[in-house]
Image (cartoon, rainbow, N blue to C red):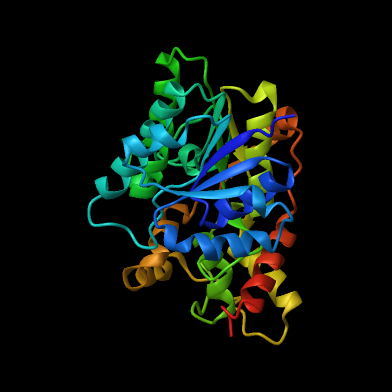
Amino acid sequence: MMKEKVLLTGISGFLGSHTAIQLLEKGYLVTGTLRDLKRAYEIRKIIAAHTKNADNLSFAQAELSDEAAWLQLTKGMDYVQHIASPFPRTLPKHEDELILPAKNGVLNILKAASANKVKRVVLTSSSGAVLYGKKKGKQSGTFNEGTWTDTSISKDTTPYLRSKTIAEKAAWDFIQSDKSGMELVTVLPGAILGPVLEEDFGTSANIVLKMLDGSIPALPNIGFDLVDVRSVAESLILAMEVPEAANERFISSAGYMTFKEVSTILKEKYPERKIPKMILPNFLTRLFALFDKTLQPVLLDLGHQRKVDNSKAKRILHWQPIDNREAVLSCTESLISLGLVK
């Protein structure tokens, strides 16, 4: 039987490398795209430490903006896992620096995949494309895939959230007018924790890192939907394989957790470490965010509880996420073992 081929964008990222490992373990032939092929050797080594099938992995260089490259790379592919997306640690000066590459990148890949008769494209979006852009008084609640972030409400969105929402909407608009029969599925993860494989880790791991290294003296009074990277990778693959998933959106979250709950888990496991437990008043969080730019994206959640409903992924994909405690602890253990936390 011929092995099916998957093109995976952003293989060097936290989620990209975990997804590649699981695809290889399931017997797929994987081509991972990198912006710079200099990283190929290192990424192969990291992935090979977690699967015996690293021989089925190849690499290609591509920028999201390079239409010709995608037309070439999607030839002969059965599936595309589009995971790459610009995710800055601090906000850019102009939001188009984020929005345009995200949107155009998605469209370049979809056009190429459609032209080359790819069966299905799975796009990694974000729960941020559901939870924000709400009118005053409507920010708290439990939201599902039927909800969209309203990008016109700038007070309740950030450039990153707008970029994810606009890119996902552009993908759905494209597929509605596409005549090739190609299917689209979008997966919307929350904040992603779980085991970090290398020093270049996902932005969400900063949540744990900052608590462990003492760089935040107290905790913002907020929570967020959380999920283990291994569970997100699994949901991406199920979204690719399950026939009923065609042309659906799926939230990938294992539940809501506050900073305080994360700190309690860490304190129990590492009693000897100075882990913050005091909760910051909201006005102080706002003040600190003026000096610590990484805090700015969390300001939208102050005073609100935005939760997601993951029942659709459980029902249609038969997906069972790893619990959040394990996501937090495996993330912590990996950060310590890689020497990222002293």
- Tell me if residue 204 comes above or below residue 290 in the rendering: above
For the residue pair 129 and 140, the one nearer the viewer reads as 129
Residue displayed at 66% across by 77% down: 337
Relative side of 60 to 14, left or right: left
Q: How many marks?
A: 0
Residue at 38% of width from left, 29% of height from top?
A: 170
Residue 144 in the figure: left or right of residue 95: right
Residue at the spot x=58%, y=37% of the render?
6
Choose between 120 and 320: the one closer to the eye: 120
Q: Could you tell me which quadrant the C terminus lies in?
A: bottom right
- The image quadrant of residue 234 is top right
What x and y, as percent, mark residue 312?
Answer: 68, 30
Q: Residue at 56% across / 78% down in the picture?
A: 340
Residue lying at the far top of the rendered structure:
179
Between 251 and 231, the residue placed more toward the observer is 231
Q: Position of residue 30 (x, y in %)?
A: 60, 43
Expressed as whole percent of the image width and height from the top left, the position of residue 165 reads 41, 37
Q: Is residue 262 above or below residue 99?
A: below
Can residue 54 be seen in the rendering of this structure? yes
Residue 138 in view in this figure? no
77 on left or right of 179: right
